[in-house]
Image (cartoon, grey):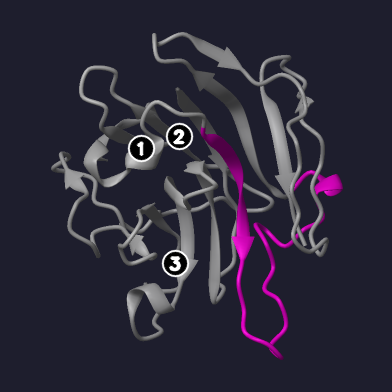
Amino acid sequence: MTQILKMLFIIKPSKKLAFGLSIEDIESLLGIMAGWHAMLQQFGQASTRNSQTHFFTSWTSAGVDKDCKNMRCPGFQKTSTNITPGDVISPVSDINGNKLSITLRLFKDKSTGDWHIHYGFNGAPKPVGYVPKSLLPGLIDKPVEIIFGGYVYHRKPQPSSPMGSGIDPIKGKAASFSSLKLIDEDGNDHAVNTDLPLRVDNPFYGITNINIVSDGRWLLLLWGA
C-alpha cells in the first residue's frame, strides 16, 4: 500500500523536531519514514544551516542502528541526481505570507518488494531512492501501521520546543497535512476523508480533526503550540 502526503510547513528551529509519514510493523519495530525535520544533533555543530528545515528519510530494522536517517547507514539506494536525503528545504512558509509545501510518496514496488520514496518541493514528487526489501523483512506481506504525524524531543529539565509553527491550530496558521491518500498495491488511490485514530503521548500540543476546506477538496490535519 502506498500513501501520498502534502504538507504545509511553518517551523522554528528546535533541538529535535520531525514530521512526516511512516509505514511500520509495530511488533518488530521495523519501518520506513520520510518527512521534514530540524535536528541540530543530526547535522553536527549548531549553525544557521543546521537549524534549518531538512528533508529526511529514515528506516529501522532488527539488529541495525535505530537512527538510520538520510545517508548515515548503508542500505538506502539513492537514485536521484538532484535530491539527497538531508537537503535543506528553503524557503519555508511564512505565517502571514506564502504557504509552501512538500509532497511525499512512500510505497512498496509490487514487482521488487523494495520500498521507494518520492519527494517534491512545491510540485509533484520525484523519485529519491529506495530501501531494499531485504532490510525490512517485517514489512513483507503482513499488516502494517500507517502513521501521519510528528514528534518533539527534548531533554529534561529544558522546556519543550514548539511544534510546527508554534501557533494554536484553531487560529488557522499552524502547520498541516493535507490531501492525504492511501494507494493500494494495484495503484488505486483512496482519499482519507474521515478522521483517523489519534495517538498522543503527552497532550501538550493542539490538533484538529480532519476537515474539508473551502475548496471542497483538501483535508487538513493541523497542530501547533
Is residue 60 placed above or below 219 in the rendered structure? below
Identity of the residue drawn at 17% across and 40% down: 80
Q: Residues within 10 Å of mark 1 (few under 14, many from 20)?
A: many
Q: CA distance from mark 1 to mark 3?
A: 18 Å
**Residue at label 1?**
119
**Residue at label 2?**
103
**What stretch of residues is rendered in magenta?**
144-173
Front residue of this view, candidates 224 and 122:
224
Image coordinates of residue 66 in percent, x first then y, are 39, 64
In this view, the residue farthest toward the right is: 170
Name the quadrant containing residue 58: bottom left
Q: Residues within 10 Å of mark 3 (few under 14, many from 20)?
A: many
Image coordinates of residue 115 in percent, x first then y, are 31, 34
Magenta: main secondary structure? loop
Nearest to the eye among marks 2 and 3: give it.
Answer: 2
Q: Does the magenta-highlighted stretch encompass residue 213?
A: no
Front residue of this view, candidates 155 and 59:
59
